[in-house]
Image: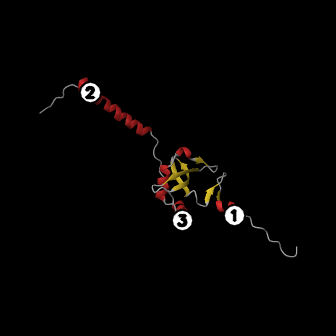
């Protein structure tokens, strides 16, 4: 049995049906034009460094990286990018990474109150070294 559809009229909501393909097409276009979510590429050296030295795990870095405010990221003199983010557990992290072909390569990550941070030149220093009093030189007897 063949069922024929009645032609749609303006009163039956035909405008809604005609608008639907446009909406679907617009959604597809928006997905194609939207920037892709970058992949975070790990190597064994960086993963072990960040975990062993700073006690930051891969999933924490990734959570904080995707939750950060990109407008607050800072470009360092060495070409790397530094930013702040929160993990799902609320741990604040300072993250340093390089972007290559739209992908993220983690360099390091640590809590901002830890001893390690970067100075204006992008060099890693120790906060405690600045607070430590200078040692007096001992003079040799007889001089």
Query: Does label 2 or label 3 sit earlier along the sequence?
Result: 2
Q: Quadrant of the N terminus?
A: top left
User: Label 2 belongs to which residue?
Assistant: 14
Neighbourhood count class around disc 1 (C-alpha, 10 Å): few under 14, some 14–19, many 20 upward? few
Of circles 1 and 3, which is in front? 1
Neighbourhood count class around disc 2 (C-alpha, 10 Å): few under 14, some 14–19, many 20 upward? few
How has the structure been colored for display? secondary structure
Q: Where 32 falls versus 4 (above or below)?
A: below
Is residue 111 or residue 121 the one in the foreground? Answer: 111
Is residue 90 or residue 75 the one in the foreground? Answer: 90
| C-alpha gap between disc 1 and disc 3 | 26 Å
Dot 3: element: helix
Dot 2: element: helix
User: Label 1 belongs to which residue?
Assistant: 132
Checking the image for residue 52, the label placed there is: 3
Query: Does label 2 or label 1 sit earlier along the sequence?
Result: 2
| C-alpha gap between disc 2 and disc 3 | 63 Å
């Amino acid at each position: 049995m063949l069922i024929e559809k009645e032609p749609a009229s303006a009163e039956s909501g035909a405008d809604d049906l005609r608008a639907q393909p446009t909406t679907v097409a617009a959604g597809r276009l928006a997905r194609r034009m939207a920037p892709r979510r970058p992949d975070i590429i790990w190597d064994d050296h960086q993963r072990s460094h960040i975990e062993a030295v700073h006690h930051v795990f891969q999933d924490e870095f990734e959570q904080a990286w995707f939750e950060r405010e990109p407008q607050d990221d800072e470009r360092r003199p060495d070409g790397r990018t530094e930013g702040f983010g929160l993990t799902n557990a609320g741990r604040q992290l300072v993250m340093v990474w390089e972007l290559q072909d739209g992908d993220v390569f983690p360099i390091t990550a640590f809590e901002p109150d830890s001893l390690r941070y970067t100075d204006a030149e992008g060099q890693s220093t120790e906060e405690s070294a600045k607070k430590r009093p200078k040692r007096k030189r001992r003079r040799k007897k007889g001089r």
